[in-house]
Image (cartoon, grey):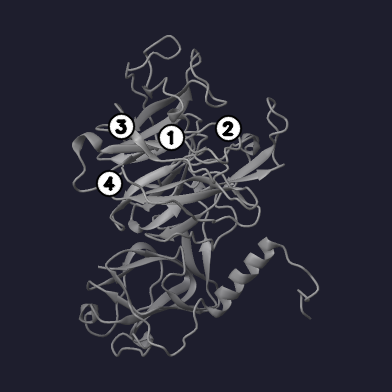
Amino acid sequence: MNPHPSNVLLSPFACARRRLGLLALFGVAAVTGRAQAPVDIGSRLELFVDRHLTEKMERVEFRLHAPVKAPRPKSPLPERHMVTVIKDGDRYRAWYRGKDPSYTGEQHTGNPGETVHYAESRDGHEWEFPNLGLHEVGGTRDNNVVLAKWPPFLTNFMIFLDTRRDVKPNERYKALAGYPGPGNKTGLDKPGHGLFAFVSPDGIRWTKKNEVIRFRPEWRHAFDSPNVSFWSEAEQLYVCYFRTWTEAGKVRSVSRATSPDFVTWSDPVEMLPNLPGEQLYTTMTHPYVRAPHVYIALPTRFVVGRGNAPEFDSKDRNATDILFMSLRAGETRYDRTFTEAFVRPGLDPARWGNRANYVALNVLQTGPEELSIYHRSGDRYVLRPDGFVSLHAGAEEGEWRSKPLVFSGRDLVLNLSTGAAGGVRVEVQTGEGVPIPGFTLAEAETIYGDSLERVVRWKGPDLGSLAGKPIRLRFVLRECDLYSYRFR
């Protein structure tokens, strides 16, 4: 019996789930017989966060893995908005928004007197708050404030460490910031309401440059959220992902612009990652630290009418959680393979309050076996390196086959976890899909266990003999989560 007869309408969310299920069942692309140009992956790390390299899947799925909350630090980051965490040398550095209770100046938002504070850590877990003495806030200079009394730029001051090879020493740290004020601003066409560039040699002392991304008159609203930017080594451009609102439906969304010099920016492109009616309050898009050609995004999903209404505004009742999205360098559309929550609000009632769930910009590697995600609550969430998504097989054996690839290196290395009865075998095929003698499934070692870097072995010759030639990879798995692979 058909569970979805033609006269029954499915919700947009159910339709999306059904489409994803069909893709997983039949594979993303059928083999058509036409020659495909191979994708040159060199020796870069490849994750299963999208179907970019997938040709065929049978009895396997892409599985999203939620991070786990680490033990609460004795000295955590405070509960704040607009948090950025960066690793620079042997230090982890954090910036977050605060407030000057004595501020009486210009009022740009509902949070007048905004400030930017600084913290640092040696291990990425316990934090110190240096007394910088730079700004008088609340009647004292005994504080860790790096920016104050600078409306409207401190509403959403999001920092990045510029990794461009020829970056000027006094501009190693950069930021884009600006806020046009609340309300519908359709038709606004005058300077001063967009994003301004800021530069710093050390992340502490800042210089404001010019307005670089102007507010556009066709926009209803923009910039009232973390507007994140970075230098993309893969694109050889500066990239910015910033808040806009969709015209149809008027939901919080995101646009993208690029720049060769952090001065002149391209016309913004609407990315429209939202499902119908879905509010994406932030994106926190950034290059993944271990594979910078892949951008990770951890947006806050904003659900109106749920959660606990804050006492100060009973009309503003909402619940939030964290989603997972990704895209490849240069793409203008996010991959939305996963539409469910990546980080749920959890057992703490406070996390069901008004705007209670945001994560900091940047997922960082804080140990050989650990990635860290910093939550606005001060908690730290962890997962294994590359552990966002796995190619998952259960008790029934399944397989995955790649599109044609070209690689460089001599070894194939896997990041995987299996059950005691599980394992994975790897077959290397020609670009046309014919098993290569010496690298067939029958000649492959069965790999089992839990390892971040397990080298694949065959009975045949050195894998390096195939470098530079079009090949396909075929993974055959049982009770296995395969997180990533790379040639080296």
The answer to whether residue 248 is left or right of residue 360 is right
Q: Work out whether 25 lies above or below 326.
A: below
- Whole-angstrom CA distance, mark 2 to mark 4, is 30 Å
The residue identified by callout 4 is 261
Between marks 4 and 3 in the image, the one whose residue lies nearer the viewer: 4
Between marks 1 and 4 in the image, the one whose residue lies nearer the viewer: 1
Mark 1, residues whose alpha carbon is within 10 Å: few (<14), some, or many (≥20)?
Answer: few
The answer to whether residue 367 is left or right of residue 66 is left
Name the residue type under label 4. Asp
The percent coordinates of residue 36 (x first, y second) are: 37, 82
Counting residues from the start of the chain, the first of labels 1 and 3 encountered is 1
Between marks 1 and 2 in the image, the one whose residue lies nearer the viewer: 1
- Whole-angstrom CA distance, mark 1 to mark 3, is 27 Å
The percent coordinates of residue 106 (x first, y second) are: 49, 19
Quadrant including the N terminus = bottom right
Counting residues from the start of the chain, the first of labels 1 and 2 encountered is 2
Name the residue type under label 1. Pro
Taking the image as drawn, is residue 336 in sight?
yes
Query: Callout 3: helix, strand or loop?
Result: loop
Contact between labelled residues 2 and 1, with CB atoms less than 8 Å apart: no
The answer to whether residue 17 is left or right of residue 273 is right
Between marks 2 and 3 in the image, the one whose residue lies nearer the viewer: 2
Name the residue type under label 2. Pro
Taking the image as drawn, is residue 415 in sight?
no
The residue identified by callout 1 is 191
Q: Work out whether 31 lies above or below 191.
A: below
Contact between labelled residues 3 and 2, with CB atoms less than 8 Å apart: no
The residue identified by callout 3 is 203
Front in this rendered view, residue 238 or 128: 238
The percent coordinates of residue 456 (x first, y second) are: 31, 74
Front in this rendered view, residue 76 or 195: 195
